[in-house]
Amino acid sequence: MHKRLFLWLGLLAVFAVTTTHAQMGGSAGWVSCPVTFKVQWPTNAAQEQRFGFNNGIYHFQVLNGDGAFVAGNQTKPRTEQRFEPDYTRGEVQYQSMEMAPSNETSYCIFQIHTGGEQTSEYGSTQFMLFWFSDDGGSVYDYSKHELASHLGNKWFQVNVDHDVDHHIIKVWINRQLVWTQKCRDADDFYFKDGVYEQPHNPSRQMDTYITGIHIWTRSSTIIPRLASIKG
């Protein structure tokens, strides 16, 4: 196991002593959903070289120059969890504890993907959270607005709420509301997390560590749809 991960596992143990209940960004009344996903990783490496799970922590890694997740795909390399099923209505919230190195940069750590990504009207992605080495390790939104800083080598809580019915996305970092935006009215969506390289001078190596994943819903109108794994 990577030496740095030993240190971070120790930090997580300290965190677990003081945090016994999930703290959600939204209000009360949420219901926990099963956490199910499929893993995507670069074609030039075995899954265990880019994705691992040890002591309750998922480790995602991409090296600059890795291949796409399927042969012939033209997107940047990624190692991600693609959560299932797709959702089409209601209000759904993603929650996790995450950590990324302060000296690594230019990759996506979370996204709300459009299920019908081939349509020109809605595009492939509704929302993304980027990781940059700026200001001691920072999280940015899709349009590169800094949402939180000085997070490098520290565990931080991420909550992303997607209210499909009212077309609103909200983001909390460490339980502080840091972003609200309107979103497009596509047909279906799904969450992804991990590492997805971005074209802003990425570092040679990109890592994300994630634990404590929860998917919550506040609506009984979600329609499960298992779409094909497209991106």
Image: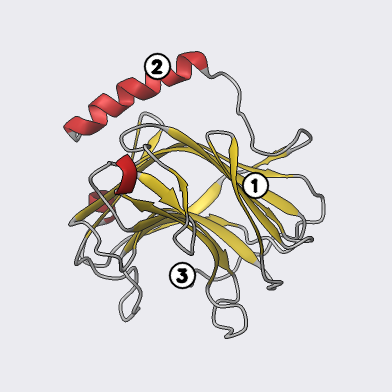
Q: CA distance from mark 1 to mark 3?
A: 20 Å
Label for residue 93? Answer: 1
> For the residue marked with disc 2, what is the amino acid?
Val
Q: CA distance from mark 3 to mark 2?
A: 36 Å
Query: Looking at the image, which residue is at 43% across and 48% down?
Result: 139
Give the position of the N terminus as an image quadrant.
top left
Query: Looking at the image, which residue is at 62% across and 64% down?
Result: 189
Is tag 1's residue or tag 3's residue first in the polypeptide sequence? 1
Residue 208 image position (x, y, % from top left):
34, 45
- Residue 52 in view: no
Residue 184 image position (x, y, % from top left):
67, 71
The residue lying toward the viewer, choosing from 157 and 53, is 157
- Residue at label 2? 14
Is tag 3's residue or tag 2's residue first in the polypeptide sequence? 2
The residue lying toward the viewer, choosing from 31 and 148, is 148
> For the residue marked with disc 3, what is the amino acid?
Gly
- Residue 203 in view: yes
> For the residue marked with disc 1, what is the amino acid?
Gln
Q: Secondary structure at mark 2?
A: helix
User: Which residue, as the protein is rendered here, is positioned at the far right?
Assistant: 220
**Left or right: 193, with 48 as reference point:** right
Q: How many residues crowd mark 3 within 10 Å: few (<14), some (14–19), many (20+)? A: some
Is tag 1's residue or tag 2's residue first in the polypeptide sequence? 2
Label for residue 231? Answer: 3
Query: Looking at the image, which residue is at 39% across and 19% down?
Result: 13
